[in-house]
Each structure stands twice: as C-alpha cells, then as structure tokens.
Amino acid sequence: MTPEDILAYPARVLSQDQRQHYFDHGYVSVPGLVPADTLAELQAVTAAFLDKSRAQTESDDNYDIGPGHSADNPVLRRLKIPDDQHAAYWDFAKGLLADVAADLVGPNVTFHHSKLNFKWFDESDTVKWHQDIQFFPHTNYNVITIGCYLADTDMNNGPLAIARDSHLDDLYDQYDSDGNWTGMLSDEDAAAVDMSRADYLTGIAGSITVHNARALHYSPSSKSPEPRPLLLNCFTSADAKPYTPHPQPSSHTYEIVRGEDVKWAHHDPRPCQIPPDWSGGYTSIYAAQAGEDAAD
C-alpha cells in the first residue's frame, strides 16, 4: 500500500499529524502512550526476567548476555522472543501496538518479531548506525519497528536516534570489505552520516517510538548505572512478503494481528541487500556488531 492509501483509512491510535510525520521523516514518537497498568505489568515481568538471567553463564535461545555477565553483575543485552516468553508481552503486541501498526502500514497487519534490548553503564553498549530491512528483506518497505521505553529515557541513558528522512535514501552495505556480515555501516560510511539529521527520541517510561525499516538509526552508550530496557516489536503490512529466512521466528511470527491476509504482494522497485542465510539461527545485533561471529 502507498502512504496515501494508508492515510485514507481512519486512525485508530495516532493522530493524522503523527501519521504524516512518520511518512515524511521515517519515524514518529508518542510520549506516555502506554496505560499505567499495562506499563507496570511489563516492568514487573521484565524485572523478573532480568533477575532470572543471573543464572545464565552463556547466551542461548532466550538470553543474549554480554561480557562480564555474572549472578552479582548481570549484563543481559537482550531477552529474545519475549512474545513467546510471557503473555504480557504478547498481549501488548497484539493489542495496543497492533493498532498503532495499522495506522502506519494499513489495515492488514502481520506480526514479525519482538525483542527486549537493554543498555548498561558501559561504553561498549553503543548500537552502531544501521538499517533494519537488510536483516529481513520484504517485497516492500511497509515494515516498522515499534519501541516502548520501560524506563524514563533521556540523553543520559542512550536513547534511540534516527537520521531524519533517511528512509528515503539509498540503503547501505552492511557487509565489511571481506564480505562478512556486520549488521552496521562501515566506519567510513558512519563517519559521513550528517549528525545534524540525528533526532534523539527521548521519553518517559511508556513512551513509544516507531521507525521505518529503511530508516538509519543508532543509540549512543548509556551514562547511567541503571539499565535502560527498550521493548521492540516489528510489524509489516500483510502485502509485504519476506523473501529470506526469518532470523529468529517465534510461535507468533507471520500471524495476522489486524485485518486479514492478502492474496497479492506489493512490490517496491527499490532494491534491498540480502543478508546471510539465517535458517541456521541468529544471536543478536550486539554480537554481530561486536564481531562475535553470531551470524555465521
């Protein structure tokens, strides 16, 4: 569907100005959107998983842990497939967030994946400049990620930053010069990013961010000793069909969460880089960007 087609449908959650901002600039943020009771439940469930991660000694299918992780000093980088790990996460995704997605990709919405990323007080926790769509190419670019801050997030604890209007630019090569997948821009490309276009999406707990899968984004390292959790859910228009293996499917992957499935795929003529073959599994962007060979 085209932006004009999508905007012709009545809004469910977002204002028309917010929807237009997304299409114009590749992102939108909405402060304090999540109801207090929903937010409190998500925070409590997340705290329990963080505590449970203390028993982990290495990354597995549920947890991605960082260097220095221990029972006394947990460094949980990512809780994987949270939609399968607790009903609160899935209820949130298929509820409020699915309505937000319908406002931006059209009435027929497919769930793609979820993840819960943490930032810690560590200069190595920067998520470098990258674009999402090269990880999971689709026939068109009505592919979005909705983030929900589970803690107040300001410039002190590593907010998401989007390069304004970058969803309209060409896609970057996210392989290195030796042909290895890195999931990020090269140092040369990253140095050339116009930082005057970087919009930092801060917000209180319960605020959401939405960015298009073509949008260039990163997050700086945190300067706070408190972990910053960001719950991320990816949705697509039902007419955006994947043409590579899913990096890490859950039981809900490709489930229609609004509207109905469609019989015709929409094809965007702009090309998309193909990632490695994910059918053998995938760890996380942290591991890829750190060169931990997670994506081999």
Image: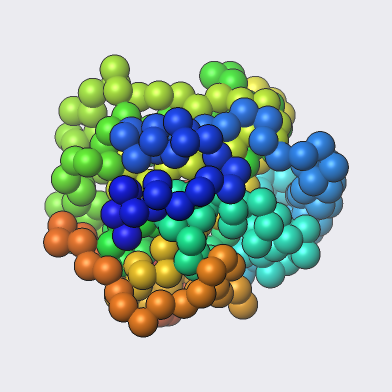
Report the number of discs.
Answer: 0
Q: Is there any visible trace of residue 178 in the rendered image?
A: no
- Residue 274's image quarter? bottom left
Left or right, residue 33 beside residue 285: right
The correct choice, above or below, for 268 with respect to 251 in the image is: above
Q: Residue at x 31, y 78 (%)?
A: 264
Q: Which is nearer the eye, 115 or 235?
A: 235
Q: Position of residue 277 (x, y in %)?
A: 32, 75
Q: Position of residue 204 (x, y in %)?
A: 67, 26
Residue ID at (56%, 24%): 202
Question: Which quadrant does the C terminus fall into?
Answer: bottom left
Which residue is rendered at x = 42% and y = 55% of the image?
105
Which color scheme does this rendered protein use? rainbow
The picture places residue 103, in percent across and down from the top left corner, at 49, 49
Residue 253 versus residue 278: which sits nearer the camera?
A: 253
- Is 11 on the left-hand or right-hand side of 74? left
198 or 247, which lies in front?
198
The residue under the point 40% across, 24% down is 199
- Residue 77 position, x and y percent, is 60, 48
Can residue 240 be seen from the camera position used here?
Answer: yes
Q: Is residue 245 left or right of residue 54?
A: left
